[in-house]
Amino acid sequence: MNLWRRATSLRLRLLAATLVALALALLLAGVLLSGLFRDHVMRQFEAALTQQLDQVTARLEFDSAGQPLIDPQTLSDPRWQKPYSGLYWQLDRTTADGLSRVGVLRSRSLWDTSLPLLADELADGAVHVHQGKGPLDAPLLMLERKVKIAEQPDARWRIVAAADMQEVTGAVGSFNGVMAASLLVLLVLLVLAALAQVAVGLSPLRAMQRALADVHEGRTQRLQGRFPTEVQPLIDDFNDVLDRNTEVVARARTQAGNLAHALKTPLSVLDQAAAGTQVVHDSELARLVKEQVGLSRRHIDWHLARARVAATQRLPGQRTAVGPVLAGLVRVMERVHAEKGIAITVQANGAPLFFAGEEQDLQEMLGNLLDNACKWARSTVTIAVEPLAGAQPLQLQVHIEDDGPGIDAAHLALVGARGVRLDESVPGTGLGLAIVQDLVGLYGGELTLHPAASGGLRATLRLPATGPQHPA
Amino acid sequence: MRILLVEDEPTLRAQLRAGLVEAGYAVDEADNGRDAHFLGDTEAFDAVVLDLGLPVLDGLTVLKRWRDGGRTMPVLILTARDNWNEKVAGIDAGADDYLTKPFHMEELLARVRALIRRASGLASAVLQCGALALDTRSGRVTLAGQPVSLTSHEYKVLDYLMHRPGAVVSRTELTEHIYAQDFERDSNTIEVFVGRLRRKLPPELIETVRGLGYRLVPPP
């Protein structure tokens, strides 16, 4: 999986393609250069040998008996004299019938060997090039030329000049070595350049990746930063989608609110009418209306809450600071439950915590739990907020504890079921906890209810969290 | 006790008015934010029932303007949008309690009673002054356990005085808090009500402070 992901990495693809192309290009260049150099050196070598051959040819004389004669003293190159020096000449005689005598004369450097007879027929004066093995098995380049002299019309003389090719192969070899090293250095430099190019070229993509991660983890709401012109349209489009998403949810919520407003006011009117003095005589109708209004109200509350939950669908990039939301709700509770004189304490030590989700949802969950706690509490409600140690992805916990009568174990299971109210004497719709549980489920959290040490109820809410925002 | 009722839906407003009047409150009405703000700013009310969704000027703005202008009467907000955001915003704007529509009249009356009592710094729903007891929930007045029969206006005067034990209450103040704005006010009628109350209750209970008004004197 990891390997596959690496193989699909843009960076790796670019690098691999560059590397292969560079290696092929440099290899081709190496082969071509090496060939050219070898040709050039060989031509030079051959030219030099041709000169030597010309010199030997020029020194060829015949004595009065018709015997060929080459005075070694007249040949300037000292290598002619030194045995096996690598520079040789040899004079062969071929008769008209094709018989040959090899090595009529030869250079002192050939010592006791002779150059192999080359079995080919030459036109007079033409020069042939051969390669072959010479003394000590050295590779030789041999040039041969056939001469005819006027005094001996039947005889053909073949002059061969040969030179050891080792110095050529040596030169070519050392050239190849230096060239290979240079090309290798070039390859390394080019690969480094390609790496730098890929890094610079792909850095906007990495920046985009980081920006996406920020949105995903809720540190930002949109993709932040400036990107190159090639990438910016994508970023803008994506931001538009995010904005539209947020807008759609906001509109859905507003419409849900408007619907509530539109329906609830007439329901209030009906309810008041049923309770009013004018229908007291017709108590059956009044009872029916009141009952149906109550039912409608529950339906509206339930379905609106569900609609709100569905609209949330965990938009990416959402984060809500828990502290301010709790503080706002505590202000409401302190004011609304002022009569009872409940002391509400919030324990939140350490760094501020952030809920990975929508503010209204957090308010809904905490508000309902807190309202329940305050309704039942005798004198104190304690709220504790803490990060869940070691949770990955991050999570946070909110404990809300009251010192009220609590709920016995048999009834705990019933709590949270839709519309179930354990005590009809306290105002409420019986929807609060069910909505909390819906929302908690949507966010992948958990709501647990336990008896508190003080005898009351302890509600623990576990929710996804996000880290603090990136410094801008 | 005088209540300002702000609600734009005419039927609901009429019903609420009927319920409040029946419970013994003098009720002034407004059907938009601008009128509501003006009334609350210029008249003396013991409590306000304020709908948040109002034409011209929304309820939250009205409430903020009152509080910024130093008006401290208790305010109960009515909200149809059942979300905590609005409740927090309402409380932060200076509301004292909220009620989500639809609601029962009894619930509204209980909240209003509690708000008025809280504003007077009284803890119990039953107001006591020596042997005299006034149950704000039932509107029953008893003297040493025996019920005392009072007319609605007598009850209103006693109710207002009992919310301010020991304080001097002028006739004008009593008039303001017992009659709604459009009522023909006559401070002389207050004297009549006080005189009747003195006959039904121990006469020394309501003291006349010359030139200032009346004071409910708790027995030593």
Image (cartoon, coloured by chain):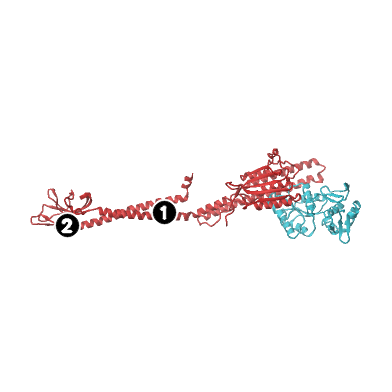
x, y (%) of residue A434? 67, 43
Residue A42: mark in rendering: none
Which amino acid lies under the numbered mark 1 shown in the image of this protein? Val
Q: Colour of chain B?
A: cyan
Q: In this rendering, would A316 be left or right of B197?
A: left
Distance between the Cα atoms at labels 1 and 2? 55 Å
* Residue visible at 23% across and 57% down in the picture: A47
User: Where A470 sits versus A373, above or below?
Assistant: below
Query: Along the line of sight, which residue is nearer the eye, B10 or A175?
Result: A175
User: Which quadrant does the C terminus of chain B fall into?
Assistant: bottom right
Q: Colour of chain A?
A: red
Q: Give the quadrant of residue B171.
A: bottom right
Which residue matches tag 1? A191
Question: Disc 2 is attached to a residue of which chain?
Answer: A
For mark 2, what is the residue? A56
Q: Position of residue A124 (x, y in %)?
A: 16, 54
In the picture as drawn, the residue positioned furthest to the right comes out as B199
**Residue type, numbered disc 2:** Val
Q: How many marks?
A: 2
